[in-house]
Amino acid sequence: MKTIPEEVINETWQRFSELSEAEAQALAQQMQEEQPFVMVYLLAADENATGEEDAGSLMELGAIIWQVMSQGGKRLRQVTGEELEAAEEANVKFLENLEEGPEMDYLSAVKQMMASYNQMPLLGAVLEALMAGNEDTPELAGENIGLALLHLKTVIDCLDQ
């Protein structure tokens, strides 16, 4: 899939924020039909990764990701549970390898990933949404942001096939 431009991401995000309750429910139903494994994955991740005050946030961000990636004109192929597990495992392994090495390798690996990641504008927008309100003091951000980002990157990885 081609890299989705920031303009498309911003337009879709704006449109999503203006949905009525009925439109949001219809969209959730459509996502359930088109990406049932992604929905189950995000619901389970949301339960484990967020506090009660943030309940549903992974699901909402996942729906935005799905909408943004659906803008290409053709229907996205259905992601399987096995694909989600494999992508999550690869992301966890990447993070574990970073932890094992020296800090210089960590910075280099992160820069390399950012330079080569196909959907970096979308991943950046997701990170920005997760960090909302904590931009100036990232150390005060919720402790589950890293785990939430891992789950959402996993979804992007799978939909970007």
Image: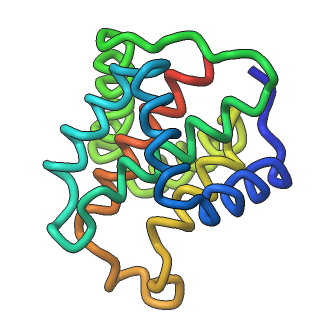
Q: Quadrant of the C terminus?
A: top right
Q: Position of residue 9 (x, y in %)?
A: 74, 51
State the residue at coordinates (14%, 49%). Answer: 48
Q: Quadrant of residue 115?
A: top right
Colour pattern? rainbow
State the residue at coordinates (23%, 69%). Answer: 143
Between residue 90 and residue 64, name the one nearer to us: 64
| Position of residue 67 in the picture relative to residue 58 (left or right) | right
| Position of residue 127 in the picture relative to residue 147 (left or right) | right
Q: Position of residue 98 (x, y in %)?
A: 37, 43
Between residue 68 and residue 155, name the one nearer to us: 68
* 57 is higher (above) or lower (below) than 66: below
| Position of residue 126 in the picture relative to residue 151 (left or right) | right
Q: Quadrant of the N terminus?
A: top right
Between residue 130 and residue 16, name the one nearer to us: 16
* 15 is higher (above) or lower (below) than 150: below
State the residue at coordinates (52%, 83%). Answer: 135
Between residue 26 and residue 133, name the one nearer to us: 26
Q: Residue furthest front?
A: 22
State the residue at coordinates (33%, 16%). Answer: 86
| Position of residue 77 in the picture relative to residue 74 (left or right) | left
* 135 is higher (above) or lower (below) than 58: below
